[in-house]
């Protein structure tokens, strides 16, 4: 009878130990997933942000190259400079007059 009680106590101790181990394991897993500033979901958010910033950086670099080429062309090509001055800024040569006409109205 005494042996049987010890076996039952050992079985209950093992169950308690397993439950505690399971609780600690689940708590550790939850901590790894949701830890503020360190968890897996925060890590994924930062990776997505890095991807977005990398794409934006690539676009800005391409735009920068385009603008540098435009600057070089404005400094070296007088015809292009004149074209830009006329189109973007509405500048005129001496003794030049601009006539603006309203577009023709559509007939019904």
Image: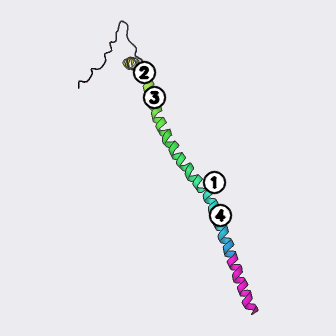
Residue 48 or 9: which is nearer the viewer? 9
Residue drawn at x 51%, y 44% is: 52
Residue drawn at x 71%, y 87% is: 7
Residue 74 - label:
2
Sequence-first tag of 3 and 1: 1
Quarter of the image that includes the N terminus? bottom right
Q: Is residue 18 above or below residue 50?
A: below
Q: Main secondary structure of the magenta part?
A: helix
Q: Which residue is mark 1?
A: 38
Q: Is residue 106 above or below residue 33?
A: above
Q: How much space separates mark 2 and mark 4, taking CA atoms?
A: 63 Å
Q: Is residue 90 left or right of residue 40?
A: left
Residue 28 - label:
4
Q: Do the residues under discs 1 and 4 have CB atoms within 8 angstroms?
A: no
Which residues are drawn in magenta? 1-16
Q: How much space separates mark 2 and mark 1, taking CA atoms?
A: 51 Å
Sequence-first tag of 1 and 4: 4
Residue 4 or 71: which is nearer the viewer? 4
Q: Do the residues under discs 3 and 2 have CB atoms within 8 angstroms?
A: no
Q: Position of residue 92 (x, y in %)?
A: 38, 12
């Amino acid at each position: 009878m005494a042996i049987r009680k010890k076996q039952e106590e050992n079985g209950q101790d093992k169950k308690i130990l397993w439950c505690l181990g399971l609780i600690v394991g689940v708590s550790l897993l939850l901590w790894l997933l949701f830890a503020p500033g360190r968890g897996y979901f925060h890590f994924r958010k930062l990776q997505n942000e890095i991807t977005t910033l990398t794409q934006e950086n690539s676009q800005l670099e391409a735009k920068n190259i385009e603008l540098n080429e435009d600057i070089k062309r404005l400094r070296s090509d007088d015809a292009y400079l004149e074209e830009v001055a006329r189109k973007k800024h509405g500048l005129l040569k001496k003794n030049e007059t601009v006539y603006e006409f309203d577009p023709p109205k559509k007939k019904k």
